[in-house]
Image (spheres, rainbow, N blue to C red):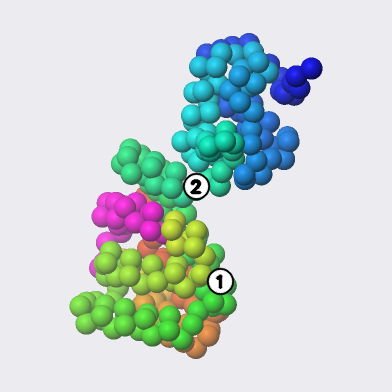
């Protein structure tokens, strides 16, 4: 007798999303891993009580986000999804609303403050040499160190992400550059007139903390450096 797939049948054929959920539940319940094969369309169709057309559409969704792929002589197998690539597809549409852009920018602030320990554990002398070149170039171009030039921000902070040694973090930072540009141009305070609660910490000072291996000073300094950004998202009516 043919083995049946142990999935609760669905009765509403129009809910492709429910079929998709059932298939992903099947993957989790059976503890399948990348490279494992999954049942054929007909088997899912019989187990769920829906047409192959519905199954095919649900599988197409999973294929689009990289969860499954079709291999010759093996059929459908589980693949390693590239979730950053899926973010790229969404952000590339330019359809994100202001609230989502704000949330993503807040995520940037969280990431930068959260990666400090990795940064200090993995930085190299060559990293510091490259940061020195970036800061020197900034200072030559702009005497007003408190101005948040997008070019300067991307160059300096992008290097920090690189120094973290976390590939996903680096890709995420590159992915968010268009978001940074939008928020920088439309949502940030005027840093020429912004009054810091303590003092502005420049890129040069942050670099010095790195050179001195002063993680406590860097952590505090980065928070002060990003104060206008934090203040903007935490107190939007006061900036």
In the drawing, what numbered circle is on residue 118?
1
Does 86 appear above or below 187?
above
Magenta stretch: includes residue 5: no
Q: Residue at coordinates 61% horizontally, 26% vertically from top-left?
A: 40
Q: Is residue 29 left or right of residue 10?
A: right
Instruction: Tell us which disc is closer to us: 2 or 1.
Output: 2
The residue stretch that appears in magenta: 173-193
Q: Is residue 1 left or right of residue 176?
A: right
Residue positioned most to the left: 141
In the drawing, what numbered circle is on residue 83?
2
Q: Residue at coordinates 53% horizontally, 84% vertically from top-left?
A: 214
Q: Residue at coordinates 38% horizontally, 67% vertically from top-left?
A: 158
- Alpha-carbon neighbours of circle 1 within 10 Å: few (<14), some, or many (≥20)? some
Does 21 appear above or below 208?
above
Residue in front for this viewpoint, 163 or 139: 163
Residue in front for this viewpoint, 56 or 218: 56
The x, y position of residue 86, in whole percent, is 44, 44
Q: Quadrant of the C terminus?
A: bottom left
The x, y position of residue 99, in whole percent, is 40, 42
- Alpha-carbon neighbours of circle 2 within 10 Å: few (<14), some, or many (≥20)? few
Task: Using the rendered image of the protein, determine whether residue 197 is visible from the camera's viewpoint.
Answer: no
Q: Is residue 28 left or right of residue 113?
A: right
- Under circle 2, the secondary element is helix
The x, y position of residue 100, in whole percent, is 41, 43
Task: Using the rendered image of the protein, determine whether residue 27 is visible from the camera's viewpoint.
Answer: yes
Whether residues under marks 2 and 1 lie with C-beta atoms below 8 angstroms apart, the answer is no
Q: Quadrant of residue 95?
A: top left
């Amino acid at each position: 007798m043919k083995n049946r797939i142990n999935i609760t049948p669905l009765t509403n054929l129009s809910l492709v999303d429910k079929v998709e959920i059932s298939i992903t539940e099947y993957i989790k319940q059976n503890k399948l891993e990348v490279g494992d094969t999954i049942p054929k369309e007909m088997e899912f169709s019989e187990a769920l009580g829906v047409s192959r057309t519905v199954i095919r559409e649900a599988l197409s969704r999973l294929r689009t986000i990289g969860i499954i792929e079709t291999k010759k002589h093996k059929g459908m197998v589980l693949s390693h999804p590239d979730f950053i690539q899926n973010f790229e597809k969404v952000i590339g549409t330019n359809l994100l609303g202001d609230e989502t852009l704000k949330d993503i920018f807040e995520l940037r602030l969280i990431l930068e403050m959260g990666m400090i320990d990795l940064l200090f554990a993995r930085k190299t002398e060559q990293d510091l040499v490259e940061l020195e070149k970036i800061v020197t170039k900034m200072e030559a171009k702009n005497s007003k160190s408190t101005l948040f030039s997008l070019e300067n921000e991307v160059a300096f902070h992008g290097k920090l992400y690189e120094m973290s040694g976390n590939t996903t973090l680096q890709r995420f930072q590159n992915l968010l550059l268009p978001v940074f540009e939008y928020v920088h141009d439309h949502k940030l305070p005027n840093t020429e007139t912004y009054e810091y609660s303590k003092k502005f910490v420049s890129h040069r000072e942050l670099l010095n903390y790195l050179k001195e291996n002063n993680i406590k000073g860097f952590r505090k300094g980065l928070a002060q450096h990003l104060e206008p950004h934090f203040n903007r998202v935490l107190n939007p009516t006061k900036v």
